[in-house]
Amino acid sequence: MRAVVQRVSEASVSVDGKVTGAIANGFCVLVGVGQQDAETDARWLADKVCELRIFEDEQGKMNRSLIEVKGALLAISQFTLFGDARQGRRPAFIDAAPPAIAKPLYDRFCSICRNRGVDVQEGVFRATMQVRIVNEGPVTLLLDSKKVF
């Protein structure tokens, strides 16, 4: 699984003009599921996101996790994180998992984060969404459960 993690002071997602999720302080996480992903990938990614220490402590160092600051998480499913644009001008998405595999793993990621005590808001799987964020810092990290980057 792959994720783009953005530290935000606020974020929201809308579908057809209706807000489906909104948070204040926390993370906006774009989540992609690959063909080879399984439950272990969802757990690894959820644990990494919940424990990632990129919030400032009293000394101004990035040393506090989402759980420690009681931040929220806005999760957005995004198969395009598995787009391959190395050749030509149109990306190929053959490494992205089909919806029957991707949806349960995306849901599992969200569930694990909730079970860790994080307030998780979500977009709508497979919908065209409008995501609004205020990236704080800015701080943006790329994560991959297979550790390819």
Image (cartoon, rainbow, N blue to C red):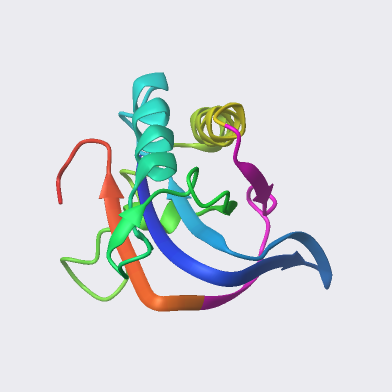
Quadrant of the snapshot with the N terminus: top left
Q: Is residue 123 magenta?
A: yes
Q: Residue at x 55, y 37 (%)?
A: 99
Q: In this view of the protein, which residue sits in the foreground, 22 or 80?
A: 22
**Residue 2: image location, x then y, percent:** 34, 47
The answer to whether any part of residue 92 appears in the image is no
Relative side of 39 to 76, left or right: left
Query: In this orientation, which residue lies closer to the viewer: 25 or 121?
Result: 25
102 over 119 or under it: above or below = above
Residue 112 in view of the camera:
yes
Closer-to-camera residue (48/123): 48
* Residue closest to the far top: 39
Quarter of the figure with residue 130: bottom right
The quadrant in which residue 96 appears is top left
23 on left or right of 82? right
- Residues rendered magenta in the picture: 117-134
Residue 53 spot, x, y in % from top left:
33, 51
Residue sitting at 68 percent across and 67 percent down? 12
Residue drawn at 50 percent across, 30 percent down: 105
Does the magenta run of residues contain 29? Answer: no
Front residue of 35 and 20: 20
From the viewer's perspective, is residue 37 above or below residue 142? above
Measuring from the top left, give residue 132's x and y in whole percent: 62, 76
Residue 97 percent across, percent down from the top left: 42, 37
Among all residues in the image, which is located at the extreme front?
58
